[in-house]
Amino acid sequence: MAFGGWWLAGRLRLWRRLAPNAFVAEVFRTLARLVFVLLGLLVALEILDATALLGAVLGAAGVAGLALGFAVRDTVENFIASLMLSLRQPFRPNDYVEIEGSEGRVARLTSRATILISPEGNHIRIPNSTVFKGRIVNYTRDPERRFAFTLGVDADSDLGAALATGVEAVKALPFVLDEPPVGAWVQDVGDSNVLLTFTAWVDQTRTDFMKARGEAVRAAKVALETAGFGLPEPIYRVRLDAGGGASPAVNVSGPPAQPPAAAGRQEAAVPAPAPAAPPPESDPSAPDDPTEEAVARERKATDAGADLLGAGTHAE
């Protein structure tokens, strides 16, 4: 029976048909070997009329297994979690994910840990038990992703016109998708301004997400300023008291007072310079993420352990 179990476990094609990936197939093969060996041992002891000895051996093995289980509880928990993750596969290699506050691209899933490459190029190893029980945010599962940003305008501004101006500026960007549409609303009223929020969607396979958001902020800001909407700064008023008398309030962030010699003389207004074009390095249509090369090097490393993110599809 043991020989038959080893022969059956050696049929790789059979287990690969039953399992979604190589790791699960190897687990099935190991379990098949163990089951057939135990069955062979049980039959042998039955033939020898030594089933009482089998009960004693199983009892001792149960106590030893319980003690060993407590000793290697974390290792066993990580192994079981890796098995479940390899079956469910909530992420694929090179996916940009957030797991329990850690962000990065998925490089490898081993039998003990999930390895991420952070945007700074650092290796992050997260135990699989934490990954399986934790909160996973997969930013690249769907190619379409929304960005949002907030700009402030003067409190006495025409908010409807300001929203329309910002929306038209964001819509004019070539990388912004028509569907889902651009969104905009009044976020909040501050001490000296009103906060406006703008949202838009991009295709991450053709556009760099962070560069796209930065270019949208720049375009909306330039459009609002060109249309005459002010983007105010915080204003502080300081009151100076001398000898019990209160002097008039001084506007710290306001324009400097005009000297007496210039009284009655009106200075010529200096036109504001035209906004400069952004450099090519900030072009959103050219996505360039150096961490993708780091992920490729990590996956080719021979000392990184077996990778469980092989063949298979998403099950979630």
Image (cartoon, helix red, strand yellow):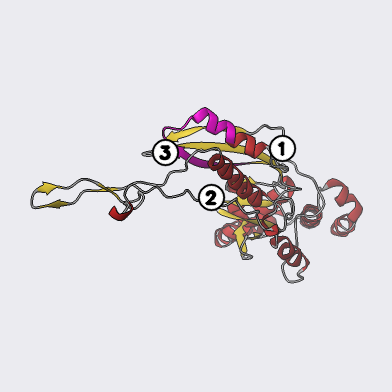
Compare marks 1 and 3 and give the one earlier in the sequence: 1
Kind of residue indicated by mark 1 = Leu
- Secondary structure, mark 2, is loop
Rendering coords of residue 299 (x, y %):
76, 64
Q: Quadrant of the N terminus?
A: bottom right
Residue at x 65%, y 53% (from the top left corner):
277
User: Where 213 falls versus 122 (above or below)?
Assistant: above
Query: Looking at this view, is 66 or 111 the one in front?
Result: 111
Cα–Cα span, label 1 and label 3: 30 Å
Task: Report the residue marked by disc 3.
Answer: 193
Q: Is residue 3 left or right of residue 228?
A: right
Cα–Cα span, label 1 and label 2: 32 Å
Q: Is residue 284 visible?
A: yes
Kind of residue indicated by mark 3 = Asn
Q: Is residue 155 magenta?
A: yes
User: Where 115 falls versus 237 (above or below)?
Assistant: below
